[in-house]
Amino acid sequence: MISMPPSERDLHAYVDHQLSEADRRVLDAWLANHPDAAAQVRAWQQDAQQLRAALGGALQQPANPELDPALIRQRLKRQSHRRLASAAVLLIAVGIGGFSGWQAREMTLVRSSVLPMTDALQAYRLIAQQGILPADYKVDTAGDMQRWLDRYFTQASRLPDLKSAGFEPVSGRLLSTDEGPAAMVMYEDRSGHKVSFYVRPPGPKNTFLPRGSRSDGDLQADYWSGGGYNYAMVSPVDTPAAPMLKQSLPF
């Protein structure tokens, strides 16, 4: 049963079609009498529709060499070899027993799981590289951007201060995930290089992330958790300010 007046969580559940029919009727009636809240809900609904449309239109993009059948077969072959190697390591470790065997098991499980913050990398490609989705909010100062983010993520960590690396926050975009709303804040330096800060709810089964980083093609994602959210800083691997960006991250 939702509370009245509805909380932000109730409104997002309404947008994501996660309310019961009875709660949805109650909220429909409440929104009819609160036009400001109704306008915000409609904006969230449009964001979700635009993101789905953008992702759905990926097949209409120019030919992607990464999707070449021959290259896909090669990647699958390499992945198969890696899985066989992991299985061999695990078998040896089990034979030896003890702590090393448990470590090998954990490493194998990590390799088979979903890679962390994939949606942060996808958002960067859609917004920063391809320009498919426009910004929801553009700012002149870092303070404005922090206030914008606080409207939707009251318990989240503060925006990283990347001034020492030459980057300032310039725009923000609200997004939708299966677990709830997410946001991407774009930073730029004077040369037009872009990096992004991404915040989202924890993944499936309330999964929080250890501090870590990974590369995905031409992008690098540094990720961590805190304040009930998962975070990622995404940047091109060839960003000149990469070492200074690393030092500016909050871990």
Image (cartoon, grey):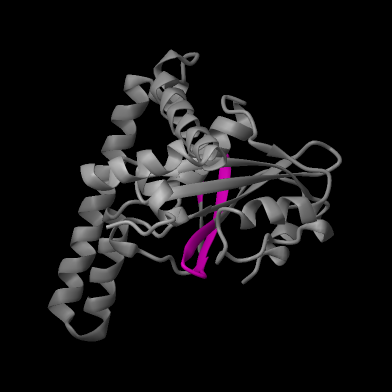
Asked if residue 208 is positioned above or below residue 239 in the image, the reply reads: below
Q: Residue shown at 46%/67% (left/top)?
A: 228
Residue extending furthest toward the front: 33
Asked if residue 136 is positioned above or below residue 158 in the image, the reply reads: above
Q: Position of residue 192 (x, y in %)?
A: 79, 36
Can residue 204 be seen from the camera position used here?
yes
- On-image quarter of the C terminus: bottom right
Q: Residue shown at 50%/48% (left/top)?
A: 182
Can residue 217 be seen from the camera position used here?
no
Q: Is residue 223 magenta?
A: yes
Q: Where are the magenta residues, as a range? A: 215-231
Does residue 249 appear to the left or right of 69 in the view shown? right
> Which residue is nearer to you in this view: 185 or 148?
148
Q: Residue shown at 43%/23% (left/top)?
A: 53
Q: Residue shown at 54%/37% (left/top)?
A: 35
- On-image quarter of the N terminus: bottom left
Asked if residue 87 is positioned above or below residue 22 in the image, the reply reads: below
